[in-house]
Each structure stands twice: as C-alpha cells, then as structure tokens.
Amino acid sequence: MRPGQVRANVKPVQPPFSPVLLLGMALKPVRPALLQPVFDGVLKMLRRRHPDILDRMADYASKPVCIDPVDLPFVILLDPNPDDPRLTVRREIDPQEVAATIHGPLEVLLALAEGKVDGDALFFTRRLVIEGDTEVVVALRNAIDGAGIDLINDISAELGPLARPFRTCASAAVDLLGRIQDDIETLRTALIAPAVKDSNAQNARISQLETELKTLRKAARRGGVA
C-alpha cells in the first residue's frame, strides 16, 4: 500500500504533477509525529477564530473524518467532537476507524476549506473522491462554507506584530508556487507532446486500416465469398 493512503476499495484521486507532489516526496522520510504540532496549532487557531464550525458538527461528534491529500505522504484524522476536537496526522488509516474519507490534491482541499470551489463540481469531475458516510461529509462542508475561512488572514491575525511580514511572505510564496506550477505544466506538455503526436498518428492509421478492412469485407461479400 502506498504510504499516506487510506486502505480502501475506492481508487484514490491521482495526484497532479505539482510543487506539492515534489514536497510530498521530500516529506516521505519525516515521521508524522514531527508534523503534529503544526496541526495542533491550526486546530487551536480555528477554534479561536471559527468556533461555530465545530458547533455545527455537534450531531456528528462521534463520526471522525479522514482527509487524504493524495499528493502528500500522510493523512489527517479529523475528530469533530466539539468538546475535544482533534486533528491527527497519520501515515495511514484503516477505513473502519472513520465514518468517511475525502481524497483530493492538497490545493483542492484547501480551496474547498476556504469555500473557493464548488465541492459538487469537484466530485463529478473526480478531482475529489468521497467514500463512506456522505452525510457527515456534507455536514462538514456546510459547516465550513459559512465560516469565512481565509488561512493566510487567519494565521496572520494570530501573529501580532509579525502579521504584516507573514502576509508579505505568504503572498510571495503563493505567487512563486503559481509560477513554478506554470513552469511544470509547460515542461510536462513539452515532454508528452511527442508521445501525444505519435499516439494521434497511430490512432489515425488504425482508423484508416479499419476503414480499408470494412471496404475489403464489403467487396468480398459482393463477390460471393463467405
């Protein structure tokens, strides 16, 4: 089983070739426990700035959700119990441990958390795969939709006098990642273009041969050949 993936029957979303995927490769040797303080900090920030999210999940307090960023080598276990919420980073999770699992690239999951994308559209285009209890996933999406999460602003608000430098660095990092992604896409296109061209030529040749074969069969039938 590939590290960071949930043991499941559903085929996970294929990770896109992106800077996040390269980061995920670099993080493979890192033990999840070393990353746990980051997620503890994120949860504390969300509880302070968006406490209503967990309140809206009160009916699903006993239904943990697995969030699987397919381009990173770990998964995140969300326990939505308002009295004792937890975000636990793990190498893998057994489906029996959770009520539902959400698979998707990190960029898509973050955009979904901030309400920047349509979850239904992502599901139908297979950029997002959900398994298990969809009711709890819908409840989670509804809870975060109205919360107004903006990770950069939320984190900067917690940093006091360091807020402005953080926003500046974060904006520069986002712009840099965007340029890197554009360069990667250009490189990917350049690398696969010859293969695509050859594949198209082969498909055209196959189509031509099929047409010729049909013509020969028709001629044979007209000539009385069985």
Image (cartoon, grey):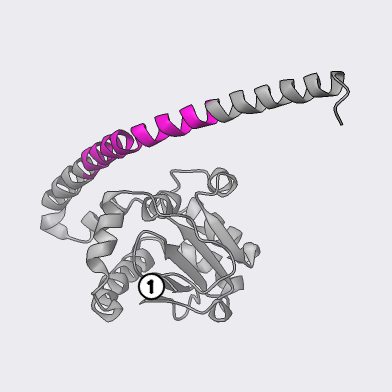
Q: Quadrant of the N terminus?
A: bottom left
Q: Please report the residue visible at 69 percent of the width from the left and 26 percent of the height from the top.
A: 213
Region of the chain picked out in magenta, as a range? 177-204
Asked if residue 77 is among those painted magenta in the image, a careful observer would answer no
Q: Is residue 94 above or below residue 28?
A: below
Image point (45%, 72%), residue name:
78
Q: Would residue 201 appear left or right of 220 to someone viewing this image?
A: left
- Residue 13 lies, in percent from the top left, at 48, 56
Instruction: Label 1: state its secondary structure.
Output: loop
Report the quarter where the C terminus lies: top right
- Left or right, 75 with reference to 123: left
| Left or right relative to 79: residue 45 | left
Q: Nearer the viewer, residue 63 or 199?
A: 199
Residue 34, horizontal then vertical, whole percent: 23, 78
Left or right relative to 99: residue 13? left
- The question of residue 190 being in magenta is answered with yes
Foreground residue, 30 or 45?
Answer: 30
Please tell me how many numbered marks the rendered image carries: 1
For the point 49% across and 70% down, the residue is 66
**In the rendered image, which residue does mark 1 sit on?**
3
